[in-house]
Amino acid sequence: MSMRTSIATVCLSGTLADKLHAAAEAGFDGVEVFEPDLVASPASPEEISALARRLGLSLDLYQPFRDAEGVTEEEFERVLRRARAKFRLMQRLGTDTMLVCSNVGTATVDDDEVSASQLRRLGEEAAAHGVRLAFEALAWGRYVDDYRRAWRIVELADHPAVGTCLDSFHILSRGHDPAAIEQIPGAKIFFLQLADAPALSMDVLSWSRHHRLFPGEGAFDLTAFLGHVLRAGYDGPLSLEVFNDTFRQTEVLRTAQQAKRSLTWLEDQAARLPDPPVRADGPARLPDAAQPSGFDFVEVKAEDAGAVDVLLRQLGFTFRGRHRSKPVRLWTQGRARVVCNEQQARDWVPTLAAVGFEVADPAASTARARLLEAPAVFRRALAGELDLSAFRAPDGTEVFLAADADGDPAWVREFEDGEPPARDGLLTGIDHVNLAHAWQRFDEAVLFYSSVLGLGTDAGQEVAAPTGLVRSQVVRSDDGAVRLALNVAPLAFDHPDGFPQHVAFGSGDVLALARQARERGLRPIPIPANYYDDLQARFDLADGVVEELADLGVLHDRDGTGEFTHFYTETIGGVFFEVVQRRGGYEGYGAANAPVRLAAQYERGRRPGR
């Protein structure tokens, strides 16, 4: 049984009515009403209340009430006047809890006793209207910016209508230890607000107002945070309060579904803590599903994939045949498998359309994906053909799940009239896959792959391209067998085939493979001589080594004791390939070389007749 969930209307785009409809359709139990949304709504509080009831939503919180405590008596009289008006409004709206933020703008008295006395008097007025007050320490509060001090003030106020609100952003952004939350009686935690955020070095107000994320999309340890709150005995809803410029201008239902997925994931993580908190209604645990153990295949879809066939042959792939019932071809080398799909692909340029993963238990992984609302994908399968579980990622990529296999997976037998697999290929498998995303879908994709497939996240980075910065985030399995690099194309990038995506194949001898590929007619992407001059200066490589790298169009990088040698093919439509060799425990992706590759692709794309 899952815990009740709620979402602040500030998280979503659209009108207040739009937000209520989206929250209900996404499966939330309630909402926090953000005051500016109500003020701007043409609907009366009574009409909003009635709409929420019809949709099955509770109105869990009215927020925010600002600049309430730490003020002079003259100012506090004005506070009481404002508060009485808001309490009457809340009665019309039908919500009984109001968020009171620590004072930022009008506080002149830095005294806990004064703040507590004023909260107590506010609490008396609130109780007379059937309202509770949840006092929250803003990270930029003038005097009260720590949840522990906010709780001391609530204790001193000593009024049944006055409790505290815990907000993960305000606590974790300041680096405050959340362990002391367990010392707060659960009955006095009136509300919980959750938000993740990227690790940024900036003023906390701007960080909060523009860069919050849903749980699982940022750098905060929300699992431990939630564990402290639940062990304290909190029994209210898990609620999201996420200020984010992207979420407030993207399609409202999709964002609401993304938000709900984040709470489902967070509940599962909390249920897996070594000392999971006990609560009658959760936290709910998703089906156990191990991380993918490897890549099963990648699929390139195109109206005419002939140029991809040529490129794969040049890289040493073996043609394994055509599918018995579909216009689909299979190429393999080692554990690297590439499917070229021309089915229902009219007007498609070569596009990376699907990625298959090997998992220990496809049924368990599929059940987990369904509970996380991953959209199902259906493909026609005739009698005797394997019907793989599949769902769709935020960028449209289709994700397939197949059982682990020592040799060829069972579905390979559906391809006929091909060549036997080569025994001396230089490719070992798929090293990583690079997927491009629109700016408004990037955070959703990070959450999707980390929650649905259980992949961990590496630190993000930005790489310079001729058209702007490319934002990149890697999600990967713990053992590195599965690595996905998720990229955001620069806004200035403009190409009819879209921002290119690519598949990187692993090799035990990248130079030998590059030589063989050259002999078969492969022309790697041109790398400027300036790069090799710089490479020699950086790593003190012998002249002969640098000359061979330059002749083959191969790049090189190091990190500590590890080395990374790799080359790129030219782009066909929206796809290119990379061949990489890792030595000495190198864990990166050649980030230092990425600007060179991006510039070379940009120059190549501008040439007539490409």
Image (cartoon, rainbow, N blue to C red):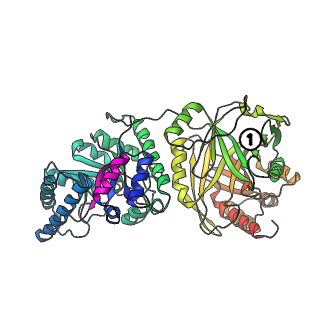
- Please say whether residue 593 is visible from this viewpoint: yes
480 part of magenta stretch: no
For the record, the magenta segment spans 45-70
Looking at the rendered structure, the secondary structure element under dot 1 is strand
Q: Is residue 569 left or right of residue 101?
A: right
Camera-nearest residue between 386 and 330: 386
Of all residues shown, which one is farthest toward the top? Answer: 384
Quarter holding residue 133: bottom left
- Please say whether residue 458 is visible from this viewpoint: no
Where residue 605 appears, as percent x and y from the top left, is 75, 66
Of the 4 image quadrants, the one containing the C terminus is: bottom right
Camera-nearest residue between 112 and 441: 441
The amino acid type, in three-letter code, at marker 1 is Arg
- Residue at 52%, 53% (x, y): give it: 459
Label 1 Cα neighbours within 10 Å, binned few <14 / some 14-19 / many ≥20:
many
Residue 18 vertical position relative to residue 477 in the rendered view, above or below: below
Please tell me how many numbered marks the rendered image carries.
Answer: 1
Where residue 24 appears, as percent x and y from the top left, is 41, 48
Q: Which residue is mark 1?
A: 337
- Residue at 20%, 68% (x, y): give it: 107
Camera-nearest residue between 488 and 51: 51
Residue 543 vertical position relative to residue 331 in the rendered view, above or below: below
Where residue 415 appears, as percent x and y from the top left, is 79, 35
Residue 25 vertical position relative to residue 99 in the rendered view, above or below: above
Q: Is residue 318 left or right of residue 50?
A: right
